[in-house]
Amino acid sequence: METLDSVGVGMYALAEKLFPICRSITGEGVRQSLRIVQDYIPIEIYEVPSGTPVFDWTVPPEWNIRDAWIKGPNGETIVDFKCNNLHILQYSIPIHQKFELEELKKHLFTIPDKPDLIPYRTSYYQQNWGFCLAHRKLRTLVRRAV
């Protein structure tokens, strides 16, 4: 018989498997997550093509991401999607460009009153790009740029 402790250990193990997967409302991350959940509970998975109307909603285009980062002027990596999948604005469009810090800051999202947390932000229905990071990290960038 399972104990509360063993159930907790199992749930934590599942969370460890699921957290690193970058998933949004569509894309390979959702498929991968659902396949893992199938190992625990019986579910049927149905695929609905992008552009399909569903009630008052239309299924958006798939969003899949391989990599994203911000590098500082000396080439050091400041923010890295591979270290934490929360570092990217969900549904961010691809961009490969150099910016001055003031321009880049328009696309950086933080939680100033919780300086050590990385926010979860999305841009499902309007094309945008951006990165999410701890506010404390942003403050170090601003101090270095001064």
Image (cartoon, rainbow, N blue to C red):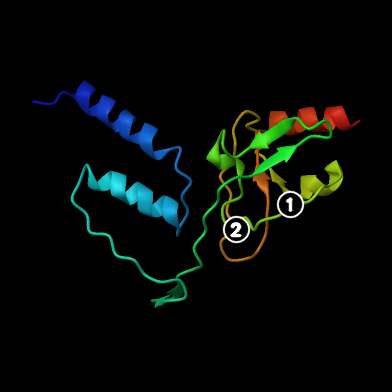
Q: Position of residue 70 (x, y in %)?
A: 72, 40
Taking the spot 46% from the left edge, 38% from the top edge, the residue there is 20
Q: Which residue is mark 2?
A: 123
- Numbered tag placed on residue 96 in the rendering: 1
Mark 1 or mark 2: which comes first in sequence? Answer: 1
Q: Secondary structure at mark 1?
A: loop
Q: Amino acid at mark 1?
A: His
Instruction: Using the image as rendered, state which of residue 38 and residue 6 is in the foreground.
Output: 38
Residue displayed at 46% across by 74% down: 58
In the picture, which quadrant includes the N terminus?
top left
Q: Is residue 15 left or right of residue 57?
A: left
The residue at the far right in this view is 146
Q: Dot 2, crowdedness within 10 Å: few (<14), some or many (≥20)?
A: some
Q: Amino acid at mark 2?
A: Ser
Q: Which mark is residue 75?
A: none
Residue at point 77% right, 50% down?
A: 106
Q: Looking at the picture, how far across and down is residue 46, in whole percent?
A: 29, 65
**Badge 1 local density, few (<14 within 10 Å), some, or many (20+)?**
few
Determine the residue located farthest toward the left in the rendered image: 1
